């Protein structure tokens, strides 16, 4: 796993109490079991990756964000679009 940027290294934290649908809780717990991590660590990692663009290089993030803005998509819709395009590329090679 890539190291966290220096600006993320802090002892400061906030606690949230969030209601999570059972089917998502099961997925989070399964990921924790499979990766031998706690549920808290899995959730923090998911959030960190979401907001830090999967720790991609800055130039890649800038290009992707410009593309997302051009398409006028929110982050989740853009990720679905990119993954769908990648799938279509894979499917065409079969």
Image (tube, grey):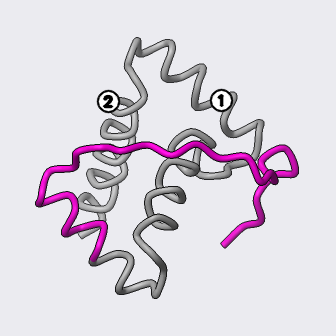
The residue located at (55%, 51%) in the rendering is: 49
Q: Quadrant of the C terminus?
A: bottom left
Please state which of residues 31 and 81 is positioned toward the viewer in this rendering: 31
| Corner quadrant of residue 27 | bottom left
| Corner quadrant of residue 39 | bottom left
Relative to 4, is 56 above or below? above
Task: Name the spot of residue 43 as percent of width and height, x first.
Answer: 44, 58
The answer to whether the residues at label 1 and label 2 have Cβ atoms under 8 Å apart is: no
Per the picture, the main secondary structure of the magenta-coloured stretch is loop
Pointer 2 residue: 77
Relative to 47, is 40 above or below? below
Q: Residues within 10 Å of mark 1 (few under 14, many from 20)?
A: few
Task: Name the spot of residue 63 as percent of width and height, x first.
Answer: 65, 29
Q: Quadrant of the N terminus?
A: bottom right
Judged from the image, the secondary structure of the residue bearing numbered disc 1 is: helix
What is the number of the mark on residue 91? Answer: none
The residue located at (29%, 55%) in the rendering is: 87
Going from N to C along the chain, the mark reached first, 1 or 2, is 1
The residue located at (22%, 49%) in the rendering is: 20
Q: Is residue 73 magenta?
A: no
Pointer 1 residue: 63
Specify whether 89 is left or right of 1: left
In the image, which residues are magenta? 1-29
Specify whether 27 is left or right of 8: left
Specify whether 79 is left or right of 51: left
């Amino acid at each position: 796993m890539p190291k966290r940027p220096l600006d993320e290294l802090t002892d400061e934290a906030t606690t949230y109490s969030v209601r999570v649908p059972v089917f998502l809780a099961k997925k989070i717990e399964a990921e924790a079991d499979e990766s031998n991590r706690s549920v808290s660590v899995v959730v923090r990692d998911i959030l960190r990756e979401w907001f830090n663009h999967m720790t991609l290089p800055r130039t890649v993030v800038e290009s992707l964000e410009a593309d997302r803005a051009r398409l006028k998509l929110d982050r989740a819709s853009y990720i679905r679009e990119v993954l769908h395009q990648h799938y279509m590329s894979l499917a065409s090679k079969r």
